[in-house]
Image (cartoon, grey):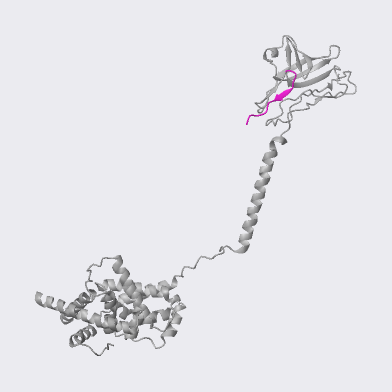
């Protein structure tokens, strides 16, 4: 075993030299600077380990969850509504209300034997038109107390054109042969007719005819109107 | 280096963030730690920087410090030794000895030059030794630590420290002899 006391003279000289070695001192400025540094380090809070549970307060978390659920419900409802929307659009006038309203004193008696005429147009129920109703026929019979004439209003697509006699919803409408509107008429075109019923000839004598501008997309591209007013739609190709 | 009489209590307070306690520990150990480092590196400027690092690490590590019976100083020297090792790994130490800005008399200046020469020789000789040899010799004979304290610093047994000391002294003696002879030859 070796002991401290057993040194050679050479080793003792080295030890003595080490013990007397100049000991440098930290300068006062350095002492203060380091002290400030470590005290500043003390002020800096240690980085806390990340908590396992979220640091968000529980009430806030619950509130956020409720808001998210509410948003989810709203989105679902909006989706359902958007799915139902096309069917909510008024269907293509499946039963155009051809109304012949008559004043009790009127002499005119609509052929329909009533004030409501059934529409001949029967759109395919599977179609889902996206626009406004494109076919509407309204037959209004108002009594004219002055000339005792019933004025009828018919609005619908032209089904046939025979010189100056056209048909709308199967009703023959006589137009003045010199009426310039005749040049504009085409089968399928929507027109507005005001006229009087000629009960003897069972036709309507047009007094005023005008072309109706259909607002909106009209018939879907896969639908066509036949001459008799029927609308036929083919299934959309997917 | 004399440990504080109530060192355990001071350490406990320092662990809780007591500034006064941390300052007390720093003021007690700053110079010895700096002196130890100054013989392990090329310049006092580097030694100052590393001393600052050692005490910053002390503050950060204090909450986890556990008193296992070893002196607090031993723990600090271990931090210092590790910091020096890191320093040499990260940097190629350059000889950037600080130019003293002190204004002293000629006599002081002569003494200072003698001291600087002696320090230079010792530094050169010590730094030619292994890290372990350096630490043992500096702590044992410059810092006047006991074998037990050095053993605690190095994490070795007292007997192992004695053996290291014996070998280190022999190597250092040879190194110093060579350095001194070279210096005499230059004059």
User: Which one is in front, A5 or A20?
Assistant: A5
Residue A14 in sight: yes
Quadrant housing residue B24: bottom left
Quadrant housing residue A3: bottom left
Residue B109, percent from left and from top = 17, 79
B53 w.r.t. A63: above or below = below
Q: Quick check: is A232 in the magenta stretch?
A: yes
Residue B107, percent from left and from top = 16, 82
Residue A27 in sight: no
Magenta residues (range): A227-238
B86 w.r.t. A237: above or below = below
A50 w.r.t. B150: above or below = above
User: Which one is in front, A201 or B91?
Assistant: B91
A82 w.r.t. B116: above or below = above
Q: Residue at x 36, y 81 (%)?
A: B152
A151 left or right of B143 in image: right
Q: Residue at x 26, y 81 (%)?
A: B137
**SS majority, magenta:** loop
Residue A53, percent from left and from top = 57, 64
Q: Quick check: is B75 in the magenta stretch?
A: no
Residue B166, percent from left and from top = 25, 83
Q: Residue furthest right?
A: A105
């Amino acid at each position: 075993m070796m002991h401290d006391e057993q040194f050679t003279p050479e080793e003792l000289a080295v030890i003595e030299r080490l013990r007397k070695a100049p000991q440098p001192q930290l300068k006062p400025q350095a002492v203060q600077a380091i002290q400030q540094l470590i005290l500043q380090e003390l002020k800096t809070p240690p980085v806390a380990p990340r908590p396992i549970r979220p640091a968000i307060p529980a009430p806030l978390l619950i509130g956020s969850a409720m808001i998210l659920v509410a948003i989810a419900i709203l989105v679902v409802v909006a989706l359902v509504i958007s799915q139902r929307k096309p069917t909510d659009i008024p269907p293509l006038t499946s039963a155009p209300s051809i109304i012949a309203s008559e004043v009790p004193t009127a002499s005119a008696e609509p052929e329909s034997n009533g004030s409501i005429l059934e529409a001949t147009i029967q759109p395919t129920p599977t179609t889902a038109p996206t626009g406004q109703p494109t076919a509407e026929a309204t037959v209004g019979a108002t009594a004219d107390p002055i000339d005792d004439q019933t004025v009828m209003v018919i609005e619908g697509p032209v089904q046939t054109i025979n010189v100056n006699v056209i048909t709308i919803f199967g009703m023959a409408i006589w137009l003045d042969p010199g009426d310039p509107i005749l040049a504009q008429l085409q089968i399928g075109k929507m027109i507005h007719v005001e006229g009087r019923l000629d009960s003897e000839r069972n036709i309507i004598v047009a007094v005023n005819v005008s072309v109706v501008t259909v607002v909106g997309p009209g018939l879907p591209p896969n639908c066509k109107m036949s001459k008799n007013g029927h609308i036929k739609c083919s299934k959309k190709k997917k | 280096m004399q440990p504080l009489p109530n060192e355990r209590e001071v350490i406990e307070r320092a662990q809780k963030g007591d500034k006064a306690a941390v300052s007390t520990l720093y003021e007690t150990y700053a110079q010895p730690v700096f002196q130890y480092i100054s013989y392990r590196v090329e310049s006092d400027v580097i030694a100052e920087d590393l001393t600052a690092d050692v005490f910053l690490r002390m503050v950060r590590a204090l909450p986890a410090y556990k008193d296992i019976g070893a002196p607090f100083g031993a723990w600090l020297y271990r931090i210092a030794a590790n910091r020096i090792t890191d320093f040499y790994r990260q940097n190629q130490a350059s000889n950037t000895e600080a130019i003293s800005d002190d204004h002293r008399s000629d006599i002081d200046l002569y003494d200072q030059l003698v001291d600087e020469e002696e320090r230079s020789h010792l530094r050169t000789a010590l730094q030619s030794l292994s890290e372990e040899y350096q630490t043992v010799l500096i702590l044992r004979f410059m810092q006047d630590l006991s074998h037990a304290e050095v053993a605690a610093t190095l994490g070795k047994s007292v007997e192992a420290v004695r053996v290291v000391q014996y070998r280190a002294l022999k190597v250092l003696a040879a190194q110093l002899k060579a350095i001194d002879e070279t210096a005499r030859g230059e004059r």
